[in-house]
Every structure is written in C-alpha cells, then in structure tokens.
Image (tube, grey):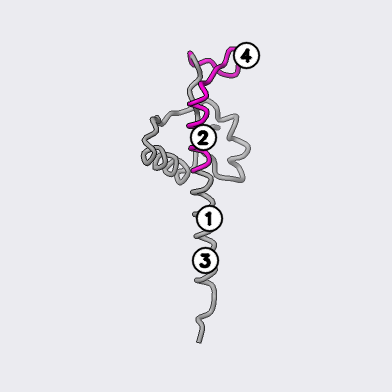
Amino acid sequence: MPMKCNTKIRNLLHEICEKNQMSYMHTISGAYHDSIFIGQFAPVGMIFVPSKNGISHSPAEWTDFEDIKAGTSLLIDALIGLANAEESNAHSHFIESQPAQK
C-alpha cells in the first residue's frame, strides 16, 4: 500500500516554493518504495527534481545543477522550518506544563 505524504510537510514545501518563486507541481508518485518503511515511524515528504528526458534510475540519468541546487535549497529550508516548528512546539508544551510562578 502506498504511503501518503505528511500534510504538514507538503504544505511547508508548497509555502517555501511560493515564497521563493520556485516552480513546482503536486504529483502522485510511484516512488513509494522510498517512503513506505520510513513512513511507518516518521512523517514523510518527497522532493523531486527534473531529470533530462524524464530518465531516472539509469546511467543515462542527468539533472541540471541548477535544478539540484533548487531541490537542495528547498530541502534545507524545509528542514529548518520543521526543526523550528518542533522547537516551538516543544517550548510551548514546556511552558504550558510548568506550574504558575508566584
């Protein structure tokens, strides 16, 4: 059974692309073999960059360096965004769980 990508991650990727005016498209991928096991214990999202003539998983595969750079930049921004969101959630939970100071 294919693994659904995490809505929070998909939305974050969408927001980053919009903010940075990066072209993107939502797609259904047959690459669930990359996510099916990890998705059992962690949220999953995927970033794809175009390969020349659509060829992938082949010695003939080629991706322009600008597309690799854009995909890497998107990944970095997403990881920072997710880390900051988790830190913020952990911090607010810590504050909420502390007894009021007198």
Q: Earlier in the sequence, mark 2 or mark 4?
A: 2
The label number, if any, that marks residue 59 in the structure image: 4
The residue pinned by badge 3 equals 93
- Measure the C-alpha gap from mark 2 to mark 4: 22 Å
Q: On the rendered structure, is 10 left or right of 37?
A: left
Residue 43 screen position, x and y as percent: 55, 44
Alpha-carbon neighbours of circle 1 within 10 Å: few (<14), some, or many (≥20)?
few
57 to 20, vertically: above or below = above
Q: Is residue 1 visible?
A: yes
Q: Amino acid at mark 2?
A: Met
Eye-nearest disc, 2 or 4: 4
Q: Is residue 40 above or below residue 63?
A: below
Q: Mark 2 falls on what kind of element? A: loop
Main SS of the magenta segment?
helix
Which amino acid type is marked by label 3? His
The spot of residue 40 in percent (x, y) is 60, 42
> What label does residue 49 carry, if any?
none
Q: CA distance from mark 2 to mark 1?
A: 19 Å
Q: Earlier in the sequence, mark 1 or mark 3?
A: 1
Q: Considering depth in this image, is 54 or 73 the residue closer to the camera?
A: 73
Q: Is residue 26 magenta?
A: no
Residue position for label 1: 86
Alpha carbon separation for disc pair 1 and 3? 10 Å
The N terminus, quarter of image:
top right
